[in-house]
Every structure is written in structure tokens, then in C-alpha cells.
Amino acid sequence: MEQTIIHWITLHGYGVIFTLLALGIFGLPLPNDLILASVGYLIFKGRLHPLPAVAVAFLGSMCGMAVNYAIGRTFGLYMVHKFGRLLHVTDEQINRMHEWFQHSGKWALVYGYFLPGVRHVTAFVAGTSKMTFREFIVFSSIGGLLWSTTYILLGYFLEESWSRETARIHHILEIGTLVAIAIAGIYFIQQRIKKRREKDRRF
């Protein structure tokens, strides 16, 4: 996979970096971290210039995030209400989620970039929660710049071992994401059980 990515970038230049990251942020099965690290490696090899490479990587990720935000802002609540019923998600829980995102969840737009699978969701949730576009741009820009720059630097400084080490880091982050989801799931189940018991006591 990494050799294919390097071939594409070498052949088509900065435009393919923008395109791959813009599409990858939609949730398509593209290894975004590996793409960024390969950009860093190509900078190390002298095939790309640092500033335009970082710029197009950042702009590509922001393009996808902006579209996800727009989808969430336009259709988010409808989709949550429609499919939330299948998971027994109540309006009260949806409102609590929105309140949390307005107060603290905006930082998820920053660190969510680094969590595989999560970065695709945060912009949609931001739109659904009616976060202002100005706030969204500020926090997602911080996250996008940190994320793209970090992995490009990794690819640059890891040199020939960039592929192996990036895959290892990605695997560690995948495990961390699964643990975080499991903890959130356990908390959600505990809250449902607690509310059900309180409801039974009333009767």
C-alpha cells in the first residue's frame, strides 16, 4: 500500500495529496496517517517541498471536515432521531450530548483527528449540535494542522523506517480508540440501568 501511495504522489504531485485526504476524511478506507507519513518521507527524499506539502495536506483534511459539518448541520438531527430510535436513544440523551459538545466537546475536533474512526464523526456531531461555523473552523483547523504536521514530521524524521513505525503508532491508537469506545459503552449501559431502577422504585 505504501509503495502505491508514494507512486501516486510522485506521479501526480500535490493534487493527489489533497484529494486522498479530502476523500479519506469522509470515512473511506484510505490510510490517512500513512498518506501523511509518506508525504514526510518524500520531503526527506527531496521530492516534495515542505510548505506546499503541509498546506495541501491541511486543506485536504479541512475540505472533508467542512463537508461532514455541513451534512451534520443540515441532516444531522433528522438522522439521529430516525436511527436513534433503533438504539433506544431518547431526546433527553441527545440534548445532553449537544450540551456536552457545546461546552467541552469542541476539543474533540482537535484530538479526534488522532483517533482512527473518530475523526470522521466529530465534524458531523459538531454540525448536528449546531456549533457555529466560526467555532468549528477554529477548533478543526487547530486539530487538522497538528495532525497533518505531526505525521508529516514522523515520516520525515523516521526516514526509511517511516512505514513500519507509522503502522505501529496507528495500531496503538486503534487499541486506544477501542478502549475509549468500550468505556463509553459501559458508562452508557450503567446509566440506562440506573435510570431503569430509579423508575421502578417510583412505582
Image (cartoon, grey):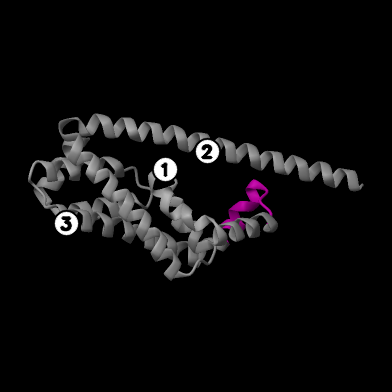
Circle 2 SS class: helix
Identify which residue, 115 or 19, lies in the foreground.
115
Amino acid type shown at disc 1: Leu
Q: Which residue is mark 3?
A: 51
Please state the extent of the stretch shown in magenta in the rendering: 78-90
- The residue shown at (34%, 42%) is 29
Q: Residue 63: where, in percent of width, then height?
A: 32, 61
Amino acid type shown at disc 3: Leu
Q: Residue 62: where, in percent of width, then height?
A: 33, 59
Is residue 179 at least partly visible in the picture?
yes
Position above or below: 172 against 33: above
Along the polypeptide, which appears first: circle 1 or circle 2?
1
Position above or below: 55 against 30: below
Q: Which residue is mark 1?
A: 115
From the image, give the main secondary structure of the stretch colored magenta: helix
Residue contact between numbered discs 3 and 1, judged by CB atoms under 8 Å: no
Q: Residue 35: where, in percent of width, then height?
A: 24, 44
Amino acid type shown at disc 2: Ala
Q: Which residue is mark 2?
A: 180
Which numbered circle lies on residue 195? none
Q: Residue 175: where, in percent of width, then height?
A: 44, 32
- The residue shown at (26%, 49%) is 149
Circle 3 SS class: helix
Label 3 neighbour load within 10 Å: few <14, some 14-19, many 20+: few
Question: Residue placed farthest to the left in the image?
Answer: 46
Residue contact between numbered discs 1 and 2, judged by CB atoms under 8 Å: yes
Marks 1 and 2, Cα distance to the nearest angstrom?
10 Å
Question: Residue placed farthest to the front in the image?
Answer: 157
Residue 70 lies within the magenta run: no
